[in-house]
């Protein structure tokens, strides 16, 4: 959603939906039937920079938008092989669009997105057979419809508003994705676009898309309550547990269990063997 690929992955969800398409995330704390919408405006400076990048790379702006979307979807699913719907202008149904988000620069990803886009729009390309994609992207301003009972769970469209500023519109089913998480996904799209605008030659696989607030929440907010650390070492704490609960089960491995007393005996036996071989502080085992 490091920042690494796993940072924003939908927990407990397979990366593939029926039909081989990339699955949409399921992030609804309080699922409720219906649909929702989140709008994210791209700042003027970023929009201008993206248009300049498109001219520099010799691609339409839609290729940059598709590259950013593929990057987000790869992180959400944890799968670099992205396959989603692509809603082209003049069509009523999405076309299948496949793109691999492998390691490399943003420039390379944009060029790969352009090739994927051209292949998707090539003559003779037909609409996907049911079941259709769960995620649909419309990079040319055509808004995605998300029926309450349809196969599309998340639609992302990019268009222009007054002054030529880019506008990202996310529509989602609220029984599977709540407003807060839709806003987060919109933020990931914006972060990817900002990265492309800033430096297309930067390696995208080394950059995360989390905002500072979300990163702080994951590192601190999810860490649980703070506890005072004991003023003793780990082996001293273990020996105290041995004295208090010698017959309590300490560890189980392959169906075999050891009590704290038994484990302590084995640990001391190993320590004496190491000392006998001359192992001391800051030395390596001879084995």
Image: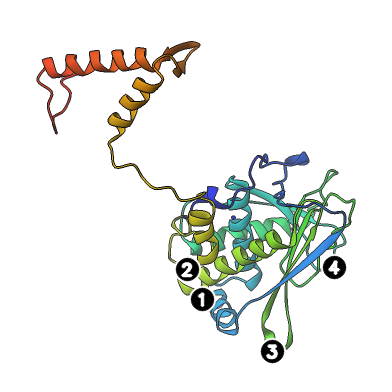
Foreground: 55 or 10? Answer: 10
Q: Position of residue 33 (x, y in %)?
A: 87, 54
Q: Is the N terminus in the top left, top right, bottom left or bottom right quadrant?
A: bottom right
Disc 2 or disc 1, which is closer to the eye? 2
The residue that appears at 72% across and 45% down in the rendered structure is: 21
Which one is closest to the eye, mark 4 or mark 2?
A: 2
State the residue at coordinates (57%, 74%).
54
CA gap between label 3 and label 1 equals: 22 Å
Numbered mark located on residue 78 in the image: none
Answer whether residue 211 is visible to the viewer in this image: no
Examine the rendering and report whether any part of residue 284 can be seen: yes
For disc 3, the marked residue is 163
How busy is the neighbourhood of tag 4: few (under 14 within 10 Å), some, or many (20 plus)?
few
Q: Secondary structure at mark 4?
A: loop
- Numbered label attached to residue 200: 2
Q: Is tag 2's residue or tag 1's residue first in the polypeptide sequence?
A: 1
Residue mark closest to the camera, 3 vs 2: 3
Of the image marks 3 and 1, the number of the one nearer the N terminus: 1
The reply to whether discs 2 and 1 touch (Cβ–Cβ < 8 Å) is yes
Which badge, 3 or 2, is on the more N-terminal residue?
3
Pointer 4 residue? 90
List x then y, in percent, for residue 275: 13, 19
Give left or right: position of 65 versus 94: left
Residue at mark 4 to residue at mark 3: CA–CA distance: 24 Å
Farthest top residue in view = 256
- Local crowd size for mark 1, using a 10 Å CA cut-off: few (<14), some (14–19), many (≥20): few
C-alpha gap between disc 3 and disc 2: 25 Å
Quadrant in the rendering for residue 60: bottom right
Q: In this view of the protein, which residue sits in the foreground, 157 or 99?
A: 157
* Cα distance between the residues tagged 4 and 2: 31 Å
């Amino acid at each position: 959603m490091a920042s690494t690929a796993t940072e924003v992955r939908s927990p407990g969800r397979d990366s593939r939906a029926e039909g081989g398409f990339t699955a949409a995330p399921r992030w609804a704390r309080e699922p409720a039937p219906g649909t929702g919408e989140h709008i994210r405006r791209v700042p003027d400076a970023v929009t201008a920079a993206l248009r300049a990048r498109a001219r520099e790379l010799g691609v339409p702006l839609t290729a940059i938008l598709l590259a950013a979307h593929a990057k987000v979807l790869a992180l959400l699913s944890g799968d670099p092989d992205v396959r989603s719907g692509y809603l082209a202008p003049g069509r009523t149904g999405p076309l299948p669009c496949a793109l691999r988000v492998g390691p490399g620069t943003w420039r390379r990803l944009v060029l790969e997105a352009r090739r994927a886009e051209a292949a998707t729009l090539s003559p003779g390309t037909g609409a996907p057979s049911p079941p259709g994609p769960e995620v649909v992207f419309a990079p040319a301003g055509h808004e995605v419809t998300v029926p309450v009972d349809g196969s599309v769970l998340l639609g992302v469209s990019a268009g222009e508003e007054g002054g030529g500023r880019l506008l990202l519109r996310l529509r989602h089913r609220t029984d599977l994705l709540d407003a807060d998480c839709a806003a987060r996904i919109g933020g990931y799209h914006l972060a990817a676009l900002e990265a492309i605008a800033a430096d297309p030659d930067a390696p995208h696989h080394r950059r995360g898309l989390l905002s500072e607030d979300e990163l702080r929440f994951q590192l601190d907010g999810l860490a649980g309550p703070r506890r005072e650390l004991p003023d003793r070492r780990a082996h001293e704490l273990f020996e105290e547990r041995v004295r208090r609960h010698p017959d309590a089960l300490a560890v189980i491995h392959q169906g075999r269990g050891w009590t704290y007393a038994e484990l302590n005996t084995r640990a001391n036996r190993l320590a004496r063997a190491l000392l006998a071989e001359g192992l001391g502080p800051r030395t390596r085992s001879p084995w």
